[in-house]
Amino acid sequence: PAGRARRRRLVCRGDTVRKRSFKQKRVTAMGILDVKIVRDYIRMCTDGWEQGWHERNGGNLTYRMRPEEVEQCRPYFRTAGEWVSMGVTGKNLAGEYFLTTGSGKYFRNVALDPAHNIGIVEIDSAGGAWRIVWGLEDGAKPTSEFPSHFMNHSVRAAATEGVYRVIYHAHTPNLIAMTYVLPLTARDFTRALWQSATECPVVFPGGVGVVPWMVPGGADIAIATSELMKQYDAAVWAHHGLFCSGPDFDTTFGLMHTIEKAAQIWVLAQSAGQGKICQTISDDNLRAIAGEFGVTLNEAFLD
């Protein structure tokens, strides 16, 4: 009874109204960092940093946003900036929006200061230019490798009927080390990785492509990589790192993680054996793994 009386007094004094007003202010105070896709994007940046794949400003991540995600973020968009030509065109991505890391920005700072280190860009109606609609404050720009990302988004979207939305580039040290030792062919790298960990033929049964060393950030490497990504979910950049694609953050990060761990095993085995390997996963073993997990291996990489 005493509690009911107290509640009646609170209502009479207007405390309930004040509490509701406070609750309403908390709701309206929500910002773009409360939108799930932005939180998930930031988490992936942090995960990559904690793996040691993003020294200084190394690596980049882009995500092609779903229409409903764009609408969730639209209330926080600022007046759009000027259109900037990419030097490449992807007409199937005209009018799309992308989350992107910034040029010269550090993955370790993304969670600490998202608005200065990441942003959202809109693609023009011709599919050849971007403009910033959120983030990348104080004159920052999308990653210098955005043209490579964009071309590969275009290819992967076409190849998967729009399912693939993530492009991720990281400086994976063990895989980079392999590019100084193995011939730079898709077959040599795919076989080495498949034979290093039983997860590999299941996670990337189509294999991996390999791009010979090229100057990063320009149209040439964008085009070369996009040609490979018509067939593969991942491409090795010689002496530079790894380029992965996928439908979501978990799948894409998992692909990067699996390839780099297999590369680490390969490097350790080669070091321990001083280049002499006594046993490995045979091609028949690889086929057996594929059969058990219901995947189809790229037979071009098997004897």
Image (spheres, rainbow, N blue to C red):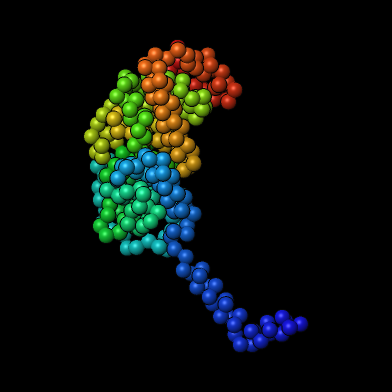
- In the image, residue 244 above or below residue 74: above
Residue depicted at 37% across the width and 17% down the height:
274
Q: How many marks?
A: 0
Residue 224 locus on image (x, y percent): 29, 31
Quick one: quadrant of the C terminus?
top left
Residue 183 locus on image (x, y percent): 31, 19
Residue depicted at 25% across the width and 57% down the height:
139
* Left or right of residue 294, residue 1 in this image: right
- In the image, residue 278 above or below residue 256: above
**Residue 72 in sight:** no
Residue depicted at 27% across the width and 52% down the height:
141
Residue depicted at 42% across the width and 51% down the height:
42
- In the image, residue 116 above or below residue 269: below
* Left or right of residue 214, residue 68 in this image: right
**Among the 4 quarters of the image, the one containing residue 273:** top left
**Residue 217 in sight:** yes
